[in-house]
Amino acid sequence: MWRDFGDVVAGALLAVGAVVWLLFVPLMFFQGALTASGLWAGTGDPVAASAFFAWASWCGVGIPILGVVISATTRRRGWTWFYGVCLAVVAVVVAVRWAQTHHAPPPPPEPTHCVERSGGESDCP
């Protein structure tokens, strides 16, 4: 009796998680972009948009992690593959975003004063 109930609950959680991840997370990002740009209601409001982006980010990462854990522990191979692919998509998005925000350090600055060099003519006074 309890095993059947647990299977139904796990299946329902996995299905609801898939719907939320596929539909509502992108909609939260879209609503955040509209709010930040001002296309939604006049002037842009980045502070209000950050809440949408934060919720979408946390749900976008958390739902696939929970989905993999629940589906793997209940031995549901199809759901494990689905949420594994979702995690791969999240990993690519995180890697691209990290690469966009973390640039290589700038090269050392060129000297601004006269530097004597050996072996050739020098332009120093």
Image (spheres, rainbow, N blue to C red):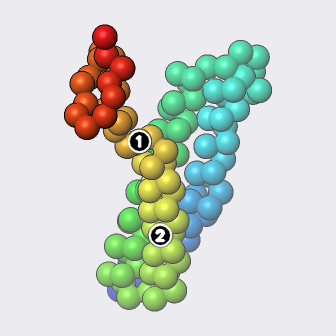
Labels 1, 2: front one = 1
Query: Residue at horizontal 77%, vertical 26%?
Result: 39
Quick check: 32 above or below 100? above
Nearer to me, 8 or 42: 42
Q: SS at mark 1?
A: loop
Q: Choose the circle earlier in sequence order: 1 or 2.
A: 2
- Looking at the rendered image, the quarter that the N terminus falls into is bottom left
Query: Residue at horizontal 38%, vertical 65%?
Result: 66
Left or right: where 108 falls relative to 118? right
For residue 114, the mark is none
For residue 88, the mark is 2
Query: Residue at horizontal 25%, vertical 31%?
Result: 117
Q: CA distance from mark 1 to mark 2?
A: 23 Å
Q: SS at mark 2?
A: helix
Q: Given the current orientation, which residue lies at the most extreme top position? A: 125
For residue 103, the mark is 1
| Mark 1 neighbour density, 10 Å: few (under 14) some (14–19) many (20 or more) | few
| Mark 2 neighbour density, 10 Å: few (under 14) some (14–19) many (20 or more) | few
The x, y position of residue 29, in whole percent, is: 61, 43
Quick check: 88 above or below 59? below
Residue type indicated by callout 1: His
Query: Residue at horizontal 75%, vertical 27%?
Result: 40
The x, y position of residue 24, in whole percent, is: 62, 52
**Quadrant assignment, res 23:** bottom right
